[in-house]
Amino acid sequence: MYFADSSSSDSVYSISTTQENRDRLRNVVCQDLGNTIPEANSSWVESLYQDLSTPAAIKKYLDGDDEYRNGRWTRIPEAPSVVTDLHDPIRHIINCIIARLGLTQESEAREAIVCQLERQCEDESEQPTPPGILIRATGPSFSSPTDSYVGFSNVAACLSVELDSGAKEIWGHLVQMTEYAKNIFVQQPNRCFVRSMMVTECQAQFFHFDRSGAQYSPLFNIHDKPETFIRLILGLASTNEYTLGFDTSVCWATSPNGTKTSGSLKTVGRDNKIVTYNLAIDDGPIARGSLLGRGTTCWVAKNDQGDRFIIKDYWVADNQTPEFELLEEAKGLRGVCQIVSYEDNRARTRDFRGDTTNLGKGAFKNRTSIRIVMKAYGPSIENFTSIDQLLGALRDAIAAHKALLSRNIIHRDVSPNNILLGEDGATEGDRGVMIDLDHALRSGGLASEVLVDSKTGTRLFQPLLALRSGQFLPEYVPLYDYLDDLEAFFWVFAYLVLTYKPNGDQMPQNPFLEETKMGWLRDPLSAYFSKRCFLDSPTIDYELRHAIDSGWGIIFEDLFLGFHTFTRELNDQKTKLVYKVKVDDHYAHVLSLFDNALEKIKGSGCETLPGPSNPPQHDSASFSANSADAASGSTSVATSDISVKGVPLGDKSVASRLDAKLIYTSVSSSSSHLSASPAEPTKLPSRPKRRSDEVELDDELPEESKRRCRPVSSSSE
C-alpha cells in the first residue's frame, strides 16, 4: 500500500471523498512528481494528434457506426452501478476506433483488453495494479512478458475507468496514473514520455508524464466531444512509436514470440557522423526507478570491433551543468571515467507539452535529453573478490577525486555504485574508477558555490553536514566542499566492511550491523544522529570488532580506525576551520592509510584470499577508460601526527564553511555519545548481494544556491 497508515481499510485506489484521504493521496503524488502538477488548458488536449485522422474520416465513422448515435456512445450505460459495468463497453469502443480509424494494415498490433498487472518498480507493494483497460502492443520497442499475455513491457498506454461520481477526485487519479507511468518507464527504457487517460460513463481526463513531472487536462464530456475522445484514443494506440513517446534511435529485433533478441543504438560520434552500437541484451539496460528527475538509463554496448562502451541517456535540468562538460574537463585523469562522444539537445520536455509559458513560477522546469558515450570498465566496487582489490580500488578512487578537485570539480555523490573496479590487471591509479558526474559541481576553489543539502546524493553515504542542513539557520547553511566528499568515502568504506566479508561474500544477518546501516537510511536528522553515534560512541571499537568478519582484522586497527578517527576529528573541528593546512595534507593522510594497509597485506599473504563462494552477479552498469597520469598526492603522513585543526576551503574570497555563529550542536567524542540502537532492531529489507537500487534523492539545484551571508574571514572567528 502507498499509505503509511496500514490501519486504513480503504484501498489506496478507491476514490475517497474525505479530506483526510485527499491529503494522503496528495502527499503520495508529491513524493513522485514534486509539489506542483499543472493543469493544462482545454486547448492543449484538443490540439493533440490532429494528424492521425481527418475530420471527414471521424465524421464518417460517427455518422455511419452504431457505436455513436443521438449525441452519445450507445454502449456506455447512462447510470452504471459499479465500475465493472463500464469495462467491456469502453474496451469495445476503443477496439472499434483502432480498427476503423487506425492504420488498418497494422491494427492487429494494438488491442484494448481489461487487465490488472503486477508492479515492476522496486520497493512497491506486491499488490497488482487495479483493473483497467490496457492497450496491448507489438513493435520494435515492445517485448512480450515470458510468463503472461500482457505486462508493462508490451502496453502502449493504460486507461483507468471510474464512475462519474468520482471524476473530480484528481489526487486519486494522479496516484493511479503515476503508478502506471513509473512501471512503463522501467519496462520500456527508451520511452521519453508516457500518456494515459481516465474515463467515466460521461467524462474523460488526459494525463502526460515525462522527466519534468506531470500535466493533466481538464475533464471533458466524451459524448459532447466525441472527436476529441477519438483522437486521444488514436494517439494512445498509435503504431508510430515516436508518437507514443519512444526514442526511436534505440531499436530492437524480436523473436516470433515477441521477446527481444538484439538491439542497436544510433548516436552522433566525434566527427558528427552517425555511429551505430550493438546493445548487449544480457547486460541491461540499467534504469533509475524514479519518475521525476534525470531518468538515467545506461546501455551496455559494443562497436563493430567488439570494444565495450557505456551509453548514458539522461535528462538535465536547465539550471544544471551538463555532465559531458565536466567529463571533457576531466579528460586524461587516471581513475576517472573517460568520455568518447556526446549528443546534446536530443529532446526537450517542454516540447512534449502544451504551452508552458502561462504556468506559474516553479510549475514547470524544462529538461533536455543528453546522451554520453563512455569507455567501459569493470563492475561496481561491491563486486570485489579480495581485500587488496577492494582497498586498491577505494584508494585509487580517492586519488581520482583529488585529481578532479585539481580541475575544480567536486563530485558530490560518492557511493559504491559510482566507484567501479578497474579492468583485470590494472595498476595503481586505475584499480578504482570514479563515474557519474551528474551531481558534480564546478568549484571556485576548494568549496563549491552550492549549499549542502540532504536532498542531493545517496542517503546511506551522505556527509553529516548535508544530513544536518535542515537544522541550520538559513543564513548559516554552509557550502558543499571537498571535505564532504572525503567524508562520504569513509561511509562507503564502513558500509562495505559492515556488509561483506574480505572475499566479497555477504555477511550473515547480524542485529548490530543491520540496525547500524538502517540508521543511516532514515530521514536526514535521524541518519545524522545515527552517524554521529557511530563516530562518537566509546564502545564502537569493541562492538565492531565482534560484529564484522574477522578477516578484516589485518586492516581494522590502522586503516579502518585511522579513517574513523580522521572523520570524527574532521567533524569535531568544522566550526573552527581556518586557512592553515594545505589540501594535500588531508588527501595524503587518507591515501597513506590505504597505502600502508596494502603494504601490510602484501607481506601477509592476505591478498590471495579466495574469491566469493558464489561469483558476483554484475547487475549495475560498468565503465572503463584508458587515461593519462594525474598527480595523486600520495605523500605519506604518519597517522599519529595528523590533526584536523585547520583546513583551507578555497581562496579567502570564497565564503568560509562555518563561522563561530553557526547553529550546530557539536557532539564531542571525549565528553558524550549518542544513545545506541533501540532494543528491537529494525531489519534492513532483504536485498541481493550487489546494490543497484541506490536512492536518487534529488538533482534540482536549490533556488537559492549561493551563499546567503557575507564571507567571513578567519580574523572574525
Image (tube, grey):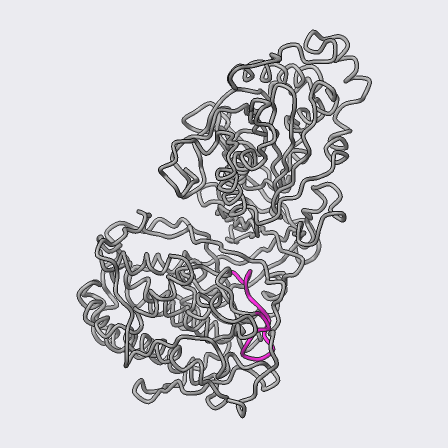
Outermost residue, bottom side: 715
Outermost residue, front side: 19
Taking the spot 51% from the left edge, 30% from the top edge, the residue there is: 15
Is residue 658 rendered to the left or right of residue 1? right
Taking the spot 48% from the left edge, 39% from the top edge, the residue there is: 20
Is residue 596 rendered to the left or right of residue 76? left
- Principal SS element in the magenta part? loop
Residue nearer the viewer, 477 or 47: 477
- Quadrant for residue 10, please give it: top left
Is-magenta flag for residue 437?
Answer: yes
Taking the spot 60% from the left edge, 77% from the top edge, the residue there is: 709
- Quadrant for residue 110, please give it: top right
List x then y, in percent, for residue 41: 74, 37
One can see residue 510 in this view: no
Magenta stretch in the rendered image: 436-450
One can see residue 498 in this view: yes
- Quadrant for residue 128, please give it: top left
Residue nearer the viewer, 132 or 674: 674
Residue nearer the viewer, 174 or 500: 174
Taking the spot 46% from the left edge, 28% from the top edge, the residue there is: 117
Total numbered circles:
0
List x then y, in percent, for residue 288: 50, 48
List x then y, in percent, for residue 310: 52, 53
Outermost residue, right side: 56
List x then y, in percent, for residue 424: 38, 61
Residue nearer the viewer, 62 or 315: 62
Up/down of 419 relative to 648, above or below: above
* Quarter of the figure with the N terminus: top left
Up/down of 266 relative to 652, above or below: above
Is-magenta flag for residue 451?
Answer: no
